[in-house]
Image: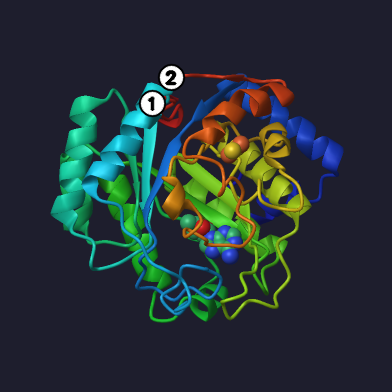
Amino acid sequence: MYDDVKNIEKLFSLDDKELLALADETRRKYLGDGVYLRGIIEFSNICDKRCAYCGISADNTLLERYHLSSEEILKAAGHIASCGIKTVVLQSGETDSLDDDWLARIIKEIKSSCDMAVTVSVGEKSFETYKKWKDAGADRYLLKIETTDPEIYSGLHPGMSLENRKRCLSDLKMLGYETGSGTLVGLPGQTVRHIAADIKYFNDNGFEMIGTGPFIPHKNTPLQDAKAGDVALVLRTIAVTRIVMKTVNMPATTAIGSMDRDFRDEALKWGANVLMPNFTPVPYKRLYEIYPGKRCISEPAGACAGCMEHLTEGAGRFIDWSRGGSARNEK
Ligand code: 5AD
Ligand code: FES
């Protein structure tokens, strides 16, 4: 039924009440009321890429760059484990200067010292590099496609190609990673049809995780004057993704928590089932500024963990402290 973009697009024509009810019912039926937690460590903001929307783009020469040492990363991972959280996300900008073997050693060390799933999110790499990290014990990988529309994609990503990004996602699936992708909602020129096509691509490829957030303009980027993504459309996109992909794991993203108010509780109601508390150490946290107004940057590392219960309960849910691997593979 959802192998046709038109049928996905039709879901967007439901009114808010219908869409919310259908997404909420689907989420409850396939996943229950539990919300999984993923502790994220943004270990470096060094980036070679020049994505037009992104505040840590190589073109933003005003930004101070940082890179955590392996000791700092392991300490933050230990902090996540001590909070009872069973997934660590290692995220950074995308750079050829990243030492693959160094990251492999960190993955191995975390896997041997903590009972945690490791998710890596460092951009486009070769099959061999992805294999090295998988062999080191990595469980999951996040690489958003951002948009599947070739024209919008090429306009925003100088020197990059949609084909290579798709190749990366297919390599990750082939290597047995639980694979996450996602869309930036509200990119200039993007329509609901484009978003429906993104969701079809995610469903066709069987990704286990989908992160959907609003585009938020950053002043030191070419898109500084563009309009921010519309929260209502982000929530509707999450809902449609839930209805189409059923068991997929979907975060209420930090970006959706960074709008004029924190909409993460709403995202949980519209189909999301994951929260990602930030464990990046304080001196660095504010430098991982992919978009402005990012929430929690002045709170101590891990402060978000304390807010999670409040957020989930506010949405009528509870925290599920298990690893929260994909239910998609068990269907
Ligand atoms: N607004 C919202 N999200 C952004 N990202 C990058 N720049 C922005 C922005 N200006 C998101 C991208 C990327 C993730 C790490 O951050 O979707 O995949
Ligand atoms: Fe980050 Fe509350 S969610 S400090």
Element at badge 1?
loop
Would you name the residue on which mark 2 appears?
Answer: 322
Instruction: List x then y, in percent, for residue 15.
Output: 86, 44
Split into 4 quadrants, where in the image is the C terminus?
A: top left
Q: Which residue sits at x=16%, y=51%?
A: 102
In the rendered image, which residue does mark 1 sit on?
86
Quarter of the render that holds ligand 1: bottom right
Q: Which of the 4 image quarters holds residue 72?
A: top left
Residue at x 16% of width, y 40% of height: 136
At x 44%, y 76%, the residue is 50
Q: Disc number at residue 128?
A: none
- The amino acid type, in three-letter code, at marker 2 is Ser
Position of 152 relative to 263 (above/below): below
Quarter residue 17 falls in = top right
**Secondary structure category for the residue under label 2:** loop
- The answer to whether mark 2 and mark 1 are in CB contact below 8 A is yes
Q: Residue 171's spot in the image, x, y percent?
A: 28, 53
43 and 21: which one is in front? 43
